[in-house]
Amino acid sequence: MAQRVNISSNSKWENIVSYSRAVQIGNVMEISGTTSSNGEEIIGKGDAYLQTQFILQKISDTLEQNGFHLKDVIRTRIYVTDISLWEEVAKAHTEYFSEIRPASTIVEVSRLIHPDLLIEIEASAILQMI
């Protein structure tokens, strides 16, 4: 049986909400909702494209630090506070996933945990054992 590994980013939110940055079981990794917050700072304030780039880099870093790669991502779930920003989000998503083309969803939500956050992204990955 594969062992469960809870991966932490040491964010204050992990203890407040009781969640892990990511969870890996065997060759599967689920990455929690990721925003453009960097400690107390919001990266790309007011810019959906920059927020998405920062988020996808954080997701990529989490994968790489745990033996996975972007090519292992099979699904992304994108939550935006304004669906009219979808083209900016899609531009950044394409920069990371144009060759990989994971299954993806983009939906509008009424708000996120901080008013300056425009986007939150989750990712699922399966390590390719070839």
Image (spheres, rainbow, N blue to C red):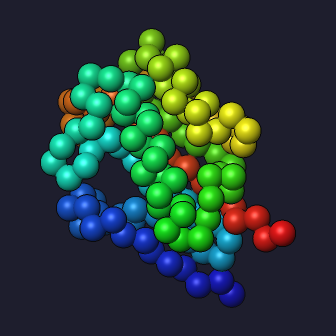
Residue drawn where x is 73% and y is 38% of the image: 99
Please provide percent x and percent y for residue 103.
69, 39
Residue 96 appears left or right of 8: right
Residue at image location 70% in from the left, 65% down from the top:
127
> Does residue 125 show up?
no
Q: Residue at x 65, y 83 (%)?
A: 2
Query: Where does the image place residue 44, in percent across and percent down from the top left?
Result: 29, 31
Q: How many numbered callouts?
A: 0
- Residue at image position (61%, 65%) is 68
Q: Residue furthest toward the front?
A: 95
Q: Residue most toward the right?
A: 130
Q: Position of residue 95 (x, y in %)?
A: 58, 33
Specify the farthest residue to the bottom. 1
- Position of the C terminus by quadrant: bottom right
Residue 21 vs 120, above or below: the answer is below
Where does the image place residue 105, in percent across and percent down from the top left?
60, 33
Q: Which image quadrant: the N terminus?
A: bottom right
Q: Farthest residue in the left direction? A: 40
Residue 47 can be seen, yes or no: yes
